[in-house]
């Protein structure tokens, strides 16, 4: 069973708005599905976190460009941890 969760946090800049994507749960990164520079639309999966034997896709909430991925496959993440940035 897959469950999708979104936890973006807006970081306001005078010239640009960055969206900080956070892990919705504690677990292990099992797949990175997007690359830095990719154009994302709402609902596009950025990566997958496995928690309690469930794979949870972490999706973009808004349209924009993926500007940073802060984790790698097999990294352990905690709930609320910054894992990617979208601009």
Image: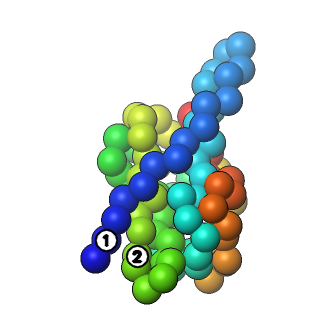
Give yes or no for contact between labels 1 and 2 (Cβ–Cβ under 8 Å): yes
- Residue 34 can be seen in this image: no
Say what secondary structure mark 2 lies in: strand
Quadrant in which the N terminus appears: bottom left
Q: Nearer the viewer, residue 57 or 32?
A: 57
Say what secondary structure mark 1 lies in: loop
Residue tagged by mark 1?
A: 2
Relative side of 8 to 60, left or right: right
Q: Quadrant of residue 75?
A: bottom right
Q: Nearer the viewer, residue 27 or 37?
A: 27
Residue 62 place in picture, x, y as percent: 42, 35
Residue tagged by mark 2?
A: 55
Taking the view exactly as shown, the residue that stands out farthest to the bottom is 53
Q: Is residue 30 above or below residue 12?
A: below
Residue 48 place in picture, x, y as percent: 46, 69
> In terms of sequence position, does the residue under pointer 1 or pointer 2 come before the other?
1
Quadrant in which the C terminus appears: top right
Q: How many marks?
A: 2
Q: Is residue 61 above or below residue 49?
A: above
Relative side of 45 to 25, left or right: left
């Amino acid at each position: 069973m897959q469950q999708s969760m979104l936890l973006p946090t807006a970081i306001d800049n005078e010239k640009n708005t960055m969206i900080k994507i956070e892990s919705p749960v504690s677990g292990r990164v099992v797949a990175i599905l997007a690359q830095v520079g990719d154009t994302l639309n709402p609902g596009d999966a950025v990566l997958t976190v496995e928690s309690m034997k469930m794979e949870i896709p972490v999706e973009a909430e808004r349209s924009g460009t993926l500007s940073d991925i802060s984790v790698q496959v097999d990294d352990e993440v905690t709930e609320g941890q910054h894992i990617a940035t979208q601009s």
